[in-house]
Amino acid sequence: AAAREGGAARRGARAARGSFPPIPAARRPIAARKRAGAAGLLAPEGRAPPPPRGKGAPRTPQRARAAIMEDAEVQRQILQMTQFIKQEAEEKASEIMVAAEEEFNIEKLQMVESEKQRIRREFERKEAQIESRKRIEHSTKVNQARLRVLRAREECIRAAIGAAHATLATITADQAKYSQLLVSLTAQAMTKVAEPAMQVRCRRADLALVEAAAPKAAAQYARAAGCAPPSVVVNTEAFLPAAAAPGFEGESCAGGVVVASMDGKIVCANTLDERLAVAHDTNLPVIRKRLFGE
């Protein structure tokens, strides 16, 4: 305590005198000595303090050259950094362009392929439509040709029937042959009717020939059937149509007879026209083969 009081008294006296003696460097704190040395205020013992540095220091040629070299180095480093950044940017841009071009080519190929497929499907659809239309047209033409052939064949057969029908007039022109034919036709019709009493109808022009042929036909029927001759009556009230005149399109009869029972329930038409129709229906395949080679 006494020492502390003495130290305080000495500091008070110094403060009264207005000055403090400098503290030797060796007795200064370590941190203070470091700060002083860094600021250039403290020189080692026996050495001169270093020359001042900074703005206030004098600029020597060596320092000027060092400063110029430092500026050149800085500019060189900046240029290298700039070139490096520019090169990196160019490489990145090139990579982006290459990637974009690849994506563009891929997208373009996909679009082209998609459009090709669409065009191919459209072409196949139209081709199928055209083929279907061709088949339909071909089938239509074939059917039309077949119908024309059938019509032509029918017309040919009809012409043959017309020619055969025209020849029937020559049969009735020969009275002797036609009389024998009337006997056969009447007997055949009686066989179909097979009644004990029958009536015979004929054309008005054939009345005399039929009246003469009826008894002969009854006797022929009786011999073939092994029975008594039937009672035969020639109908003189209802005659068959006359032969067709040129240009006439109504009902006609080329000749022959119609035999029926007395009550008219059983009828057998055995005229030349009916016989020609039966021959046509029966022999139609033969007629077609003869005419068309089928």
Image (spheres, rainbow, N blue to C red):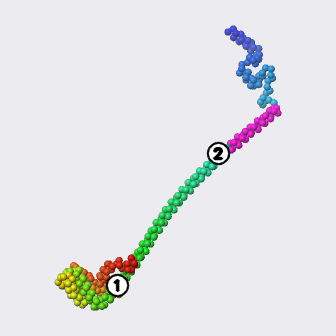
How far from the left and from the top, in percent, is residue 182? 26, 87
For the residues labelled 2 and 1, say whether their Cβ atoms are less than 8 Å apart.
Answer: no
Q: Main secondary structure of the magenta part?
A: helix
The residue that appears at 27% across and 91% down in the rendered structure is: 176
Name the quadrant of the N terminus.
top right
The residue that appears at 75% across and 17% down in the rendered structure is: 26
Tell me the residue that label 2 is attached to.
92
How far from the left and from the top, in percent, is residue 221? 21, 84
| Residue 43 seen | yes
Q: Quadrant of residue 79?
A: top right
Disc 2 packing (10 Å; few <14; some 14–19; many ≥20): few
* Viewer-nearest of discs 2 and 1: 1
- Could you say which disc has been placed on residue 164 in the image? 1
From which residue to which does the magenta span run?
59-87
| Residue 202 seen | no
- Could you say which disc has been placed on residue 13 in the image? none
Q: Quadrant of residue 199?
A: bottom left
Question: Horizontal placement of 130 versus 180: left or right?
Answer: right
